[in-house]
Image (cartoon, rainbow, N blue to C red):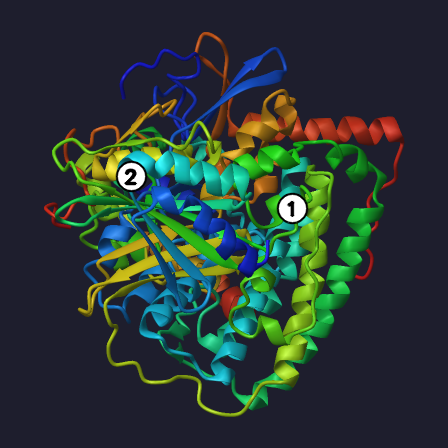
Amino acid sequence: MKESQRKSVLAVGPFHPLQEEMEFFQLTVDGEKVTDVNVRLSYNHRGIEKLSETLQFDQVPYLVSRVCGICSASHPLAYVQAVEEIAGVKPPDRALYVRTIINELERIHSHLLWVGLGGHFIGYDTVFMWAWKYREPVLDLLEEITGNRNNYGNVKVGGCREDIPDELIPKINQELDVIEKKTEMLTKAVLDDPVLHARLKGVGILKKDDAIKYAVTGPTARGSGIAIDVRRDDPYAAYADLDWKVISQPEGDVFAKAVVRLLETFESIKMVRQALARLPKGPVAVDVKEIPPGEGCGHAEAPRGETFHYVRSDGGNRPVRHKIRAPSYVNVPSFKASCIGADIADVTLTLAAVDPCYSCTERIAVVDGHNAVVHDYEELLRLSREKTALIKKEIGAPEMKLEGC
Amino acid sequence: MDWKLWALKKSIWVFHVNTGACNNCDIEIVNLLTPKFDVERFGIKLVGSPRHADALLVTGVGTRQAAKRLQEVYRQTAKPCVVFCTGACACGTGIFEGAYHVAGPVDNIVRQVDPNAIIAYVPGCPPKPQAMIMGVVKALSALQPKEKYATERVEQTVVANPG
Amino acid sequence: MQQNELNRQLSRIQAKLTGIDRKAGNRVFLSCEAENVYAVCRFLFSELGLRFVISTGIDATDCFEVLHHFSNDESGCVVTVKAFVRNRESPELDSITPLIPGAEWIEREMHDLLGITFRNHPNLERLILADDWPEGVYPLRKEVQT
């Protein structure tokens, strides 16, 4: 890596404090405030777009499901929608509903995961354990429906690979009732807790015009007052038939994003119930023999934002070009706008609020003007939790109420 | 070396390394700490530095950028240690075989540094947390076959909680 | 804005385009030569207020194509600007990052993977290829085998 003229190069490795390697995120500080952010991707780059060109159209969904583990239903969905656009194919109605159900179940467990991680970063490990405990039933449901807790492999060009057996529907509804109660309790605990208000409000603010300049999507955008949502703006699957609302908050801070994600979880539960009640009869796929030459754009609202796939075909049985854009690709750069000028104790939380992949948040470090690492990830985590403890002491608040274990 | 391996069986401290994964395996690893699986009751815990670790949980295909870092981590981990290749990608690059930025499966990368490295494979995409626990138990039992006590007790606990 | 209004507005930029392709559903492709790409994107982003989605670089064998995708969220329409970069020996294009900071990463990525140079880009450093990846090898070009 060539020497850069800027201050924030020569950081320390992601794994050991004394190693001279590039960190994923390097922040330069002046005292306790962040003055610059530099990012180095590459650790996770696997060359998926090139691999896509060597696979046949119906093999690609299995590959793109593994672009990101937590959006593993949205990527193949956006891809097959792009291909269906080229081929002029409309999947049967039952397939559209099955796709909706699986995607919304994924959203539920993804948002609960985020709540847990957010809690972990500020030292509320009970919230972490709680949220992740109540994700498990959703993962079990997905395993019963599709055969895997993650990486469902259920969409294909023309519909779905597997159907939801009617006998499973009462069980899904039952589990949803339990999950809804637990999420209600978790939401109430978060929204009512004065320490969380003090800790999360005003932190990591992403202003609306920055949000537009960085082209953010998903809860990162909706938490800054930009009420966009692919499910409503360019409806796909069965979303146009269901009754639900887009949640947005204007403040742009971490608290606003937490509220958006928690309330969206309720909307998702509502949508799954409706979809199950209205599940049309019929096949779950149509046969698609050939993909003519052409190009298509498919997008889906993943838990993190808009997943966009562009596919070009020349009439053969492999894509000529497949562009994959995960939502974090546009959301993560906005971290620069929301953390410059912020406290270093807040950086792990601000980055987490954008909800990048979990490993991205592990690769963060702070360097000083002389390029030596001042704080690595473990240290930043500790600073964040210390800040929470301090706030708690100042307010004199009792422990968070998490009833109904 | 025998007595050191015996010591490994009491409470395994693991260090997690992501060498270019989609995060599914990483999240399933974190799931191990959560109430449903709760590996801390076996004394297994995730540590923040390889110098404190007895085992490395490695996920991901081993991208070109991450390969050297993995080798550095391996060098710094106290020996003896077990490298768990977690997930299809770590076991043999999985679905990413032939991709231009992949430096080869994790075992090749580690063996370049230490041809005698102890490597265990936990396949799956992602491997279920139960499979990971089973993988750890099996690997440790294989390392010290005469010690039956730990194997039996842990297997019973795992079976009693099929999850 | 609504779709009818969008269609009307798009015809205002017609002079800079070599073609407008309206596909079934909500997809519009605007073709233009490389020198007009900045003006067209500025029209879509600053005047019409469309949201930037991402860019796609394509090795189309006889030329390079750089597609900038925008979204009109109100009507769900995806408007793609397709710029043709005819010079294969040293492909160059004006960067849209000074206009849209969100495009910084994707232009760096296209530079890494296809070797396209973006003029006026604030920071065209390596983004996603490894530190030891050989210079001059562009993985997404057709001549590079997987």
Residue A354 at what x, y percent from top left?
57, 41
Residue B107 or residue A11, whichever sits in front: A11
Give the label on residue A226, or none.
1
Q: Residue at x 69, y 79 (%)?
A: A174
Describe the element under mark 1 as helix, strand or loop.
loop
Closer to the camera in the image, A191 or B55: A191
Tag 1: amino acid = Ile
**Is B145 drawn above or below residue C88 in the view shown?**
below
Q: Tell me the subunit letter for badge 1.
A: A
Which chain is indicated by disc 2? B
Is residue A174 positioned above or below A384 on the image?
Answer: below
Q: Are marks 2 and 1 on the same chain?
A: no
Q: Distance between the residues labelled 2 and 1?
A: 61 Å
At 64% from the left edge and 43% from the top edge, which residue is drawn? A118
Q: Do the residues labelled 2 and 1 touch (CB within 8 Å)?
A: no
Residue at 50 percent across and 12 percent down: it is: A368
* SS assignment at label 2: loop
Question: What residue would you read off at disc 2?
Answer: B1
Q: Where is residue C78 in the image (x, y as percent from the top left)?
A: 45, 56
- The x and y percentages for residue A397 are 88, 36
In the picture, which quadrant includes the N terminus of chain B? top left
Q: At which x and y percent is residue A206? A: 64, 34
Query: Which corner quadrant holds the C terminus of chain B?
Result: bottom right
Residue nearer the viewer, A90 or B85: A90
Up the image or down, B108 lies above or below C96; here it is: below
Res. A328 visible in picture: yes
* Dot 2 amino acid type: Met
What label does residue A190 carry, if any?
Answer: none
* Side of B24 where A130 appears, left or right: right
Instruction: Name the mark nearer the viewer: 2 or 1.
Output: 1
- The residue positioned 49% from the left and 58% from the top of the image is C77
Front residue (pair A132, C96): C96
